Amino acid sequence: MEKNTKRTRKNGFCRWEKAAVAAFLFCILLQFTSFSARCSHIEESVLRMHVLANSDSVEDQTLKRQVRDRVLAESAELLAQAGDKVQAEQVIRQQLPRMQAAAEAEVRRQGYSYPVRAELENCYFPTRKYETVTLPAGRYDALRIEIGEAGGHNWWCVIFPAMCLPAAQENRELESVLSAEELEMVEDADEYAVAFKTVEVLEKLRKWLRGSK
């Protein structure tokens, strides 16, 4: 009789422990689902810029930064009146020839003859920290500028809302497109370090499975 009682208690504890673990995992899943949804909205709310240098030589990396500054100046002027990401994307799409011409002009001005390609693409970005803001890994729409072979280290930032220009106030700009919860997430990245890393691993796996940029 005593053995049966112990067995019953043991089985009861096992069921309780399993239920507790299941409830804990369910809470974690709910939290991550919410985090993932916020990441998706961030991807949909910003327009990024991606400049790829011809190579990693000192000269080509310097040229990349010069082209970056020229294109940033052009895009800032064009996007000054954009009210949201959709409008910003439409403007850049319509003005791609102007963006490419500006980049080409800077390449020529610096004494190089590299070809330049400007496109608006949806491509993968890893987790990236900008001063006080961290953007999660994911697929973002971006103005992509390729210089020459585009085989060198690249540079990226956010052109809508304007976070690339020296005078831009990152947090203030993001307030216009992100919710309070999303803004807290990108400002307090250390608190969400595990979630950021998990999203990055999953996005890399998704990128690998797609075999895409």
Image: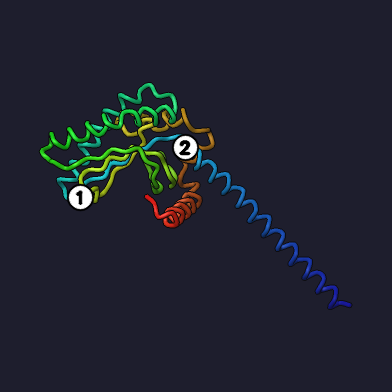
Query: Looking at the rendering, which quadrant does residue 21 occupy?
Result: bottom right
Seen from the viewer's position, the closer of residues 99 and 76 is: 99
Pinpoint residue 98: horizontal percent, then vertical percent.
Answer: 26, 29
Query: Looking at the rendering, which quadrant does residue 81 occupy?
Result: top left
Q: Which residue is mark 1?
A: 55
Tell me if residue 32 comes above or below residue 116 in the rendering: below
Residue at position x 28%, y 46% in the image: 154
Pinpoint residue 19: horizontal percent, then vertical percent.
Answer: 72, 59
User: Which mark identifies residue 25?
Assistant: none
Residue at position x 43%, y 24% in the image: 83
Tell me if residue 43 comes above or below residue 161 in the rendering: below
Q: How many marks?
A: 2
Q: Amino acid at mark 1?
A: Ser
Residue at position x 29%, y 43% in the image: 155
Q: CA distance from mark 2 to mark 1?
A: 31 Å
User: Which mark identifies residue 44?
Assistant: 2
Judge from the rendering whether residue 181 lies leftward or rightward of residue 80; answer left or right.
right
Seen from the viewer's position, the closer of residues 105 and 195 is: 105
Seen from the viewer's position, the closer of residues 54 and 3 is: 54
On-image quarter of the N terminus: bottom right
Q: Is disc 2 in contact with disc 1, using a CB cutoff of under 8 Å?
A: no
The type of colouring in the image is: rainbow
Query: Looking at the rendering, which quadrant does residue 106 occupy?
Result: top left
Q: Amino acid at mark 2?
A: Glu
Residue at position x 50%, y 46% in the image: 191
Pinpoint residue 204: horizontal percent, then vertical percent.
Answer: 43, 54
Pinpoint residue 189: horizontal percent, then vertical percent.
Answer: 46, 44
Describe the element under mark 2 as helix, strand or loop.
helix
Judge from the rendering whether residue 125 lies leftward or rightward of residue 17; answer left or right.
left
Q: Residue furthest right?
A: 1
